[in-house]
């Protein structure tokens, strides 16, 4: 569903990503792991178009893509749950959800019932402002907003950061449900090792902007991955 070949990215004169070869399959969770500062979020930005890649190729659902703006990537089926959630604090929960309509045809501009089945708290708080929600509730709102866009690829950037344990479990169940439903590739950037390892079908571990370890989870040693980066 999503593939990169030789992807590079620069911030000014500094090269951040060094030739990333990557692929994520529909119906699977592909985890990107590594310590702070190794390029995980930069890789997602390059995929989403929020920071244009310097070189390399990106293929989405079998189609080679030029460098596109974020809104164009979203319209083609790539949806992001950013680090820090980035919800609109003065909009209500319902209004935050409806911001996802921007990439949908008018006939599809409705919040599916499944959203409130996955995240019942959002139905209860639909009229509350986003900024009044707890961190965990905001994270659920950010994921729900991304799902309304009907993505082919869902990018999740550290969804457990600063979240209480019971909400982490809820988010894990939602990811497992989406995986089992099939049809969508889920790319998870995560530092919480046990959470990532438990969900992953395939892993990429980055170090200094390059892939240090990659492969299907079944072929990797959990001890080796832990020891390599002290995760």
Image (spheres, rainbow, N blue to C red):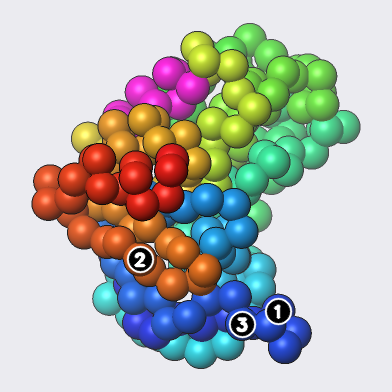
- In the image, is 23 to the left or to the right of 146? left
Secondary structure under the numbered disc 2 in the rendered image = strand
Label 1 environment density (alpha carbons within 10 Å; few <14, some 14–19, many ≥20): few
**Of tags 2 and 3, which is closer to the observer?**
2
Question: Residue 74 lies in what quarter of the image?
Answer: bottom right
176 in the magenta segment: yes
8 in the magenta segment: no
Per the model, the C-alpha gap separating discs 3 and 1 is 6 Å
**Residue at left offset 57%, top offset 27%:** 140
> Residue 2: percent from the left, percent from the top?
34, 67
Q: Which residues are magenta?
A: 168-178
Q: Mark 3 highlights which residue? A: 15
Q: Is residue 160 above or below residue 166?
A: below
| Residue 36 visible | yes
> Residue 123: percent from the left, percent from the top?
60, 15
**Of tags 2 and 1, which is closer to the observer?**
2
Q: Mark 1 highlights which residue? A: 11
| Residue 53 visible | no
Per the model, the C-alpha gap separating discs 2 and 3 is 17 Å
**Residue at left offset 73%, top offset 38%:** 87
Q: Mark 2 highlights which residue? A: 212
Secondary structure under the numbered disc 1 in the rendered image = strand
Per the model, the C-alpha gap separating discs 2 and 1 is 21 Å
Secondary structure under the numbered disc 3 in the rendered image = strand
- In the image, is 223 to the left or to the right of 81? left
Label 3 environment density (alpha carbons within 10 Å; few <14, some 14–19, many ≥20): few
**Residue at left offset 64%, top offset 45%:** 83
Question: Is the C-beta separation of discs 3 and 1 under 8 Å?
Answer: no
Judge by depth and name the residue closer to the eye, 108 or 167.
167
């Amino acid at each position: 569903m999503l593939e990169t070949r030789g992807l590079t990215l620069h911030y000014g004169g500094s090269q951040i990503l060094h030739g990333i070869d990557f692929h994520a399959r529909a119906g699977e969770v592909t985890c990107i792991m590594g310590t702070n500062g190794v390029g995980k979020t930069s890789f997602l930005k390059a995929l989403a178009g929020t920071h244009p890649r310097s070189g390399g190729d990106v293929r989405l659902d079998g189609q080679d893509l030029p460098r596109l703006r974020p809104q164009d990537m979203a319209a083609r089926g790539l949806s992001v749950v950013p680090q820090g959630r980035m919800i609109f604090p003065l909009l209500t929960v319902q209004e935050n959800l409806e911001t996802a309509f921007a990439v949908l045809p008018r006939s599809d501009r409705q919040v599916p019932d499944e959203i409130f089945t996955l995240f019942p708290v959002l139905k209860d708080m639909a009229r509350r402002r986003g900024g009044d929600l707890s961190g965990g509730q905001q994270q659920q709102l950010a994921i729900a907003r991304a799902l309304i866009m009907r993505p082919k690829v869902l990018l999740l950037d550290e969804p457990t950061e600063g979240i209480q344990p019971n909400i982490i479990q809820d988010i894990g169940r939602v990811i497992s449900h989406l995986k089992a439903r099939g049809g969508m590739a889920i790319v998870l950037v995560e530092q919480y090792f046990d959470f990532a390892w438990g969900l992953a079908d395939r892993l990429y571990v980055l170090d200094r902007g390059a892939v240090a370890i990659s492969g299907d989870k079944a072929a990797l040693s959990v001890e080796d991955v832990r020891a390599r980066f002290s995760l």
